[in-house]
Amino acid sequence: MLLGKYHIVIFKEGTGGSRNLRMRGWFGFFVFVLVATLVACNAWLLRAWFHAAMLEENLANAERQIDEQRRGLVNLVERLDAAGQDLQRIQRFDAKLRLMMNMEKDPADVGDDRIAAFSRSYLPLHRQELAVRKMQEYLARLSAAARLEEVRQQDLLRALREKRDSLVSVPSIWPAVGFISSTFGRRASPLGGMGTDFHKGLDISNRVGTPVVAPAEGTVTLTAPDGAYGNSIEINHGNGIKTKYAHLQRWIVQPGQWVKRGQVIGYVGMSGRTTGPHLHYEVHLHGVPVNPMRYILE
């Protein structure tokens, strides 16, 4: 019955005309199914579109959160790296003080390279969970190093109290303002040629007339021209430590005079054998030249 033949008459209002349509039932059923299918497909597509839009929004939010977390991790890494560098600077300062008091080895041998290297080990990482694990390990090392340094500082504080009087004779400040043009140790000859020589001190370059100060208290033992050194000053600080200042323009102290740390003793010049205005500064320990940097507290 449903799939039988149908005769449909369509009347047009006002004209009296009509139109006849003849069709079989299966065709109407087919049209009905087609329309229903199209409606269902449109409904499913609309639902899928809303779902995709929601997923896209969630993905955008997740990417923003990940980006914020990544920036937070990078900022934390920078702060941790700065803390590690601060700790290393404190350790070097501590080691230099201990060396000055004959309590420990050279500062160059002190420190934990693993602490300073954290940022270099972090940069290649691409997985955040691995970065977090590395930061946790780094924080553990940093915490252990800080506790150790706290104990060492207590020992140093007691030693400083016991040796307070001897520290005033340690040449711990820069004798002049300027830049280091030659360091302590072997170097190429500054006067040309293929040879090398051993430089017994530091060359601090600056313009002629720059003040030169005593880096520690002591007794002036020499103020005189000294061959290639030119106008020179020598100071005995006690405890086997002596300092020498060469190539001066002039001196303003006399042998036997007691000077204090920071007191002006002369001025930078170009006297003696030199290629330009600078102060040649030496530190001798029991008659042996040593690197002045081991005593200077930067």
Image (cartoon, helix red, strand yellow):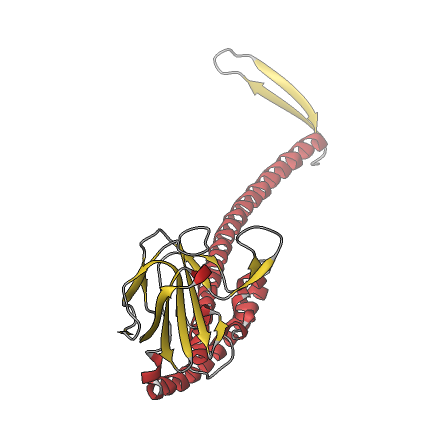
Q: What percent of the width, then of the height, locates residue 109?
A: 54, 74
Q: What percent of the width, then of the height, locates residue 13?
A: 49, 16
User: Which of the image's four quarters has the C terminus?
Assistant: bottom left
Hey, which quadrant is residue 222 in on the image?
bottom left
Front one among 115 and 263: 263
Residue 77's place in the image compared with 163, above or below, is: above
How many numbered marks have been drawn onto this rendered protein structure?
Answer: 0
Front one among 124 and 176: 176
Q: What percent of the width, then of the height, locates residue 125?
A: 60, 60
Hey, which quadrant is residue 265 in on the image?
bottom left
Residue 12's place in the image compared with 93, above or below, is: above
Residue 234's place in the image compared with 29, above or below, is: below
Q: Please give the name of the residue rendered at 34% of the width and 52% of the height, measured from the top-left corner.
A: 208
Whether residue 174 is visible: no
Q: Please give the name of the residue rendered at 32% of the width and 78% of the height, measured from the top-left corner.
A: 168
Front one among 12 and 35: 35
Q: Please give the name of the residue rendered at 44% of the width and 83% of the height, measured from the top-left corner.
A: 152
Whether residue 210 is visible: yes
Q: What percent of the width, then of the height, locates residue 49?
A: 55, 42
Front one among 233 and 155: 233
User: Which of the image's four quarters has the N terminus?
Assistant: top right
